[in-house]
Amino acid sequence: MCWYCGSAITAGEPVGRSLRCDDCGRDLRSCRNCRFFLAASRDGCAESRAEMTADRERGNFCDWFSLNPRYRDITGGAGKARADEVKARAAFDDLFS
């Protein structure tokens, strides 16, 4: 599912750089959708060989990109709750931008 709006990602691997979410229009091949994304680290990536990316929410050419499995194939149940959480967080963040 999209890290921003929580909608299902129907595209398979490999995810192209120009691919966008059908609902919110955000780039899908971004650090935020990657299995190696680690917000707590200095450069935001758990893969030590990856180059640092300035904007983790925009599409990039990272060779290490792999769609985060916890975002993949989530369509109901706990996935619905996660999608609602993501949407609520996005709405809250929009209040301050």
Image (cartoon, rainbow, N blue to C red):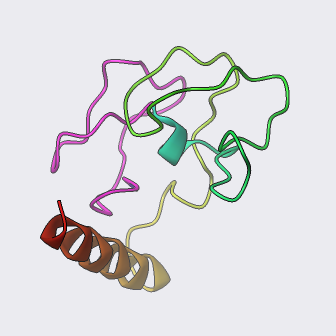
- Observer-nearest residue: 91 or 82? 91
Looking at the image, which residue sits at the far right?
48
Which residue corresponds to the image point at 45% horizontal and 30% vertical from the top-left? 29
* Residue 80 drawn at (x, y percent): 36, 80
Answer above or below: position of 70 versus 49.
below
* Residue 91 drawn at (x, y percent): 18, 73
- Tell me: 64 left or right of 19: right
Determine the image quadrant of residue 84.
bottom left
- Observer-nearest residue: 46 or 65? 46
Answer above or below: position of 10 versus 61.
below
- In the rendered structure, does residue 75 fall within the stretch colored magenta? no
- In the rendered structure, does residue 10 fall within the stretch colored magenta? yes
Answer above or below: position of 95 versus 18.
below
| Badge count | 0
**Split into 4 quadrants, where in the image is the C terminus?**
bottom left
Which residue corresponds to the image point at 26% horizontal and 40% vertical from the top-left? 26
* Residue 18 drawn at (x, y percent): 31, 18
Which residue corresponds to the image point at 27% horizontal and 61% vertical from the top-left? 5
- Tell me: 83 left or right of 15: left
**Split into 4 quadrants, where in the image is the N terminus?**
bottom left
Determine the image quadrant of residue 79.
bottom left
Highlighted range, magenta:
2-29
- Tell me: 44 left or right of 74: right
Q: Main secondary structure of the magenta part?
A: loop
Which residue corresponds to the image point at 63% horizontal and 34% vertical from the top-left? 66
